Amino acid sequence: MGLVFKIVQEEHGEIDKRYSSDLKSLIDMCLQKDPTKRPTVREILKMQLIRDKAKEFVEQTSLQRSKT
């Protein structure tokens, strides 16, 4: 519950520059104080960033399994 409380009560700090602008944008959206402004899980799963990372994960996992 501590994280949830922090999200709704405090402003988050600047997101490290090492992260992509797409990831920083997603984090900003998820940390909105107003829950109606946060994306739903369905909306997050439709984001190209998430779709690309999921595809990459599946490909890597499949490759690792084929080696064993």
Image (cartoon, rainbow, N blue to C red):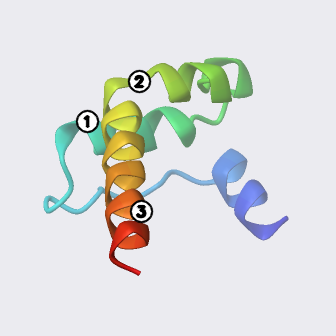
Residue drawn where x is 32% and y is 63% of the image: 63
Disc 2 or 1, which lies upstream in sequence?
A: 1
Q: Position of residue 57 (x, y in %)?
A: 38, 54
Q: In this figure, what is the number of numbered marks?
A: 3
User: Which element type, helix, strand or loop, lies under badge 2?
Assistant: loop
Q: Are marks 1 and 3 in contact (CB under 8 Å)?
A: no
- Of residues 32 and 48, the one nearer the viewer is 48
Q: Position of residue 14 (x, y in %)?
A: 30, 56
**Looking at the rendering, which quadrant does residue 2 occupy?**
bottom right
Residue 47: assigned label: 2
Question: Does residue 32 lie above or below 67 as drawn?
Answer: above
Q: Are marks 2 and 1 in contact (CB under 8 Å)?
A: yes
User: Which label sits in the foreground, 2 or 3?
Assistant: 3
Asked if residue 2 shows in the view, the reply is yes
Residue 12: assigned label: none
Q: CA distance from mark 1 to mark 3?
A: 24 Å
> Given the image, on which type of amino acid does mark 3 rest?
Thr
Question: Does residue 34 lie above or below 52 as drawn?
Answer: above
For residue 40, side relative to residue 49 (left or right): right
Asked if residue 40 shows in the view, the reply is no
User: Which label sits in the foreground, 2 or 1?
Assistant: 2
- Of residues 26 and 37, the one nearer the viewer is 26
**Looking at the rendering, which quadrant does residue 35 occupy?**
top right
> Given the image, on which type of amino acid does mark 1 rest?
Asp
Q: Which residue is mark 1?
A: 22
User: Which element type, helix, strand or loop, lies under badge 1?
Assistant: helix
Q: Which residue is mark 3?
A: 61
Most extreme residue toward the right is 1
Residue drawn where x is 31% and y is 44% of the image: 23
For residue 5, side relative to residue 19 (left or right): right
Q: CA distance from mark 2 to mark 3?
A: 21 Å
For the residue carrying disc 2, how many other residues have a C-alpha within 10 Å: few (<14), some (14-19), or many (20+)?
few
